[in-house]
Image (cartoon, rainbow, N blue to C red):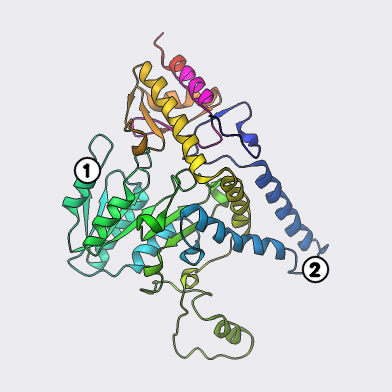
Amino acid sequence: MVLKLKDEFPLLKGKIHFDTATTGAMPASTIKILGEYVETVQAMFRGELPWQSGTGEYAKRRLNSKKLFAEVIGGMEEEVAFIPNATAGINTAMNMIPMKRGNNVVCTNLSYPMTATIVNKQRDRGAKPKWIKNKKGTVTLEQFGKAINDQTAAVVIDQPSWFNGYLHDLKGLAEICHAHGAKLVVDGTQCVGSLAWEADRWGVDFVATSTYKWLMGGHYGQSAGFLFVSKPNVDATQPVYVGEKTLEPAVGERNTTDEFTLYDFKPRKGLERIEVFPRQEISYVAVENSMKVLLAHGKKAVERQVKDVDNTLIEELTKRHFRFQTPKEENSRIYVNVQVPDFKAVGEKLMARNVHVAPRIGGLRISPHFYNTEEEAVALVKVLREVTKPR
């Protein structure tokens, strides 16, 4: 069954865009809203609108994006914070987790280099990284169970693996973590928006994401992010960095308009206190609309469409004897990496024929979203065969 789209996606016209894991296509309605936002700001600076009054309605949309993201991630609005991007979110999460010498942090070699860098940085706090090596593109709960112990402060993973789409069992992994007092920290940028997340039910402690991929928030240079922090962790510790939202609103207002009384540090409760730079209004206005489009289709229906397209890719590629760096089982992946010789050159040939995929780690990462179809998957494999066929 093909999911009937409730908006147009102009980027898809005349192209086969299976590269959402790099950048997602943007709904036509979001493109329109971005243009209106820019025009409103320009009008304000041309003096055609009252000074500093032009974006009031957009400010409401920005705040509403938290509510919508909570629905996307399967949590509550008070568990969501604005962050600049996923990297800032993972750093923030790690800084909220107490660590001491003798602790360890568990990670895998399926993780994105950014994730691995943040894990290695915890050496400065006395924690030792523990690396799990993947087996044929997967890391099992049994492997995690052997690596995690009572000295583990955090387990840090990407969901899914950035280059091959492998999905971890988050619920099972959270149970192992919590049995040892460890926190589960997830970079969800590669599937928040395509997987039907239930973060609270699964027991995940922290999830960070950027908005420019599966949430369809626009170009990388204009993107922002969200950080989910489960309720028990919201007020458990204070973040390293502070900003304008750190203090209670009344205190902040008094000290910027009336008098200086900040002779003591009394941070506010709630997750807003970690929002050191909570603006990027245009980014949240864009993703707010795109999440409306996403949710209008239903989270489970979106995941079903993505996996149906994946299944067709697996079937068509298997028929033609391609090899995978991704598990074939539906519940173990959200996109596909197929091995091809000269994978970078093949990627360029596909791009020249308006087929968008990404060369990654010895293969081609093929990452559909709900706006892709099984017919497009068949067409993609046909073109791939043509450009890889020996002459």
Q: Position of residue 5 (x, y in %)?
A: 61, 36
Looking at the rendered structure, which numbered label has been put on residue 336?
A: none
Instruction: Please state if 373 lies on the left or on the right of 45 as rendered.
Output: left
Question: Can I make out residue 213 in this image?
Answer: no
What residue sits 28% from the left and 52% below the top?
173
Q: Secondary structure at mark 2?
A: loop
Where does the magenta region start and end?
360-384
Q: Which residue is mark 1?
A: 133
What residue sits 51% from the left and 40% below the top?
302
Query: Does the segment drawn in magenta span residue 286?
Result: no
Q: Quadrant of residue 228?
A: bottom left
Instruction: Please state if 201 lies on the left or on the right of 73 as rendered.
Output: left
Question: In the displayed structure, would residue 223 be above or below residue 9?
Answer: below
Q: Position of residue 380 (x, y in %)?
A: 49, 23
Question: Can I make out residue 5 in this image?
Answer: yes
Q: Which residue is mark 2?
A: 50
What residue sits 82% from the left and 64% below the top?
47
Question: What's the residue type where badge 2 is placed?
Answer: Pro
Question: In the displayed structure, would residue 337 be above or below residue 132?
Answer: above
Query: Does the segment drawn in magenta span residue 366?
Result: yes
Q: Secondary structure at mark 1?
A: loop
Q: Residues within 10 Å of mark 1 (few under 14, many from 20)?
A: some
